[in-house]
Amino acid sequence: MTTSRTVRPRRNAKQTRHFRGETPLGRQLIAGMRDVARHVRGEIDLPSRTVVVPERVDVKAIREASGLSQREFASRYGISERSLQEWEQSRRQPEGAVRAYLTVISRIPQAVHEALKQ
């Protein structure tokens, strides 16, 4: 009488390691999931890696704080003078990336100016 037996293919040592988290990526994934679990339980706080782009920016106030005319501000920071006028007169609002750029200009204008200089 013969019995039926399921035969599983054998894995070599290198293949087996992938299933036990012994590769660098596997160790990182396991450590990350442990951190997530500890965070969910309230044991640790994870650092925030998100940025918040303001919904609205006061373009005119940013420009006036710089002491530059519309033409000078537009030229210094690579912005269309016409767009700047539209934003200042509230006919249009800058898109997300431009709002982020204007926020950086308002906080560290000299760094932006230096980064854009040729």
Image: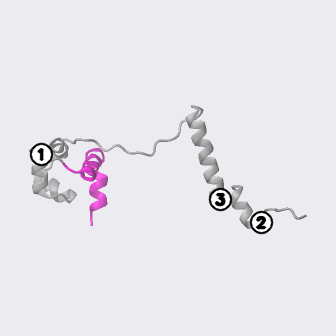
Q: Which of the two discs, 1 and 3, sits closer to the camera?
A: 3
Mark 1 residue crowding within 10 angstroms, few (<14) / some (14–19) / many (20+): some
* Color encoding of the figure: one colour
Q: Position of residue 107 (x, y in %)?
A: 29, 44
Disc ID at residue 88 = 1
Question: Tag 1's secondary structure?
Answer: helix
Please indicate, yes or no, whether residue 22 appears anywhere in the rendered image.
no
State the residue at coordinates (77%, 68%). Answer: 12
Give residue 54's position: percent from left, percent from top.
Answer: 28, 42
Mark 1–mark 3 distance (CA, rounded to whole Å): 52 Å
Residue 71: image location, x then y, percent: 11, 56
User: Residue tagged by mark 2?
Assistant: 13
Please report whichever mark, 1 or 3, sits nearer to the chain's N-terminal start: 3
Element under label 3?
helix
- Is residue 72 located in the magenta-colored stretch of the structure? no
Q: How crowded is mark 2: few (under 14 residues within 10 Å), some or many (20 or more)?
A: few
Start and end of the magenta stretch?
94-118
The furthest residue to the right: 1
Give the answer, above or below, for where 40 lies relative to 77. Answer: above
Determine the residue positioned at 16% across, 59% down.
75
Q: Which amino acid does label 1 sit on?
A: Glu
Contact between marks 2 and 3 (CB within 8 A): the answer is: no
Query: Which circle's residue, 2 or 3, is located before the other in the chain?
Result: 2
Asked whether the beta carbons under mark 1 and mark 2 sit within 8 Å of each other, the answer is no
Which amino acid type is shown beneath numbered disc 2? Ala
The residue that mark 3 highlights is 24
Residue placed most toward the observer, 20 or 73: 20
Q: How crowded is mark 3: few (under 14 residues within 10 Å), some or many (20 or more)?
A: few
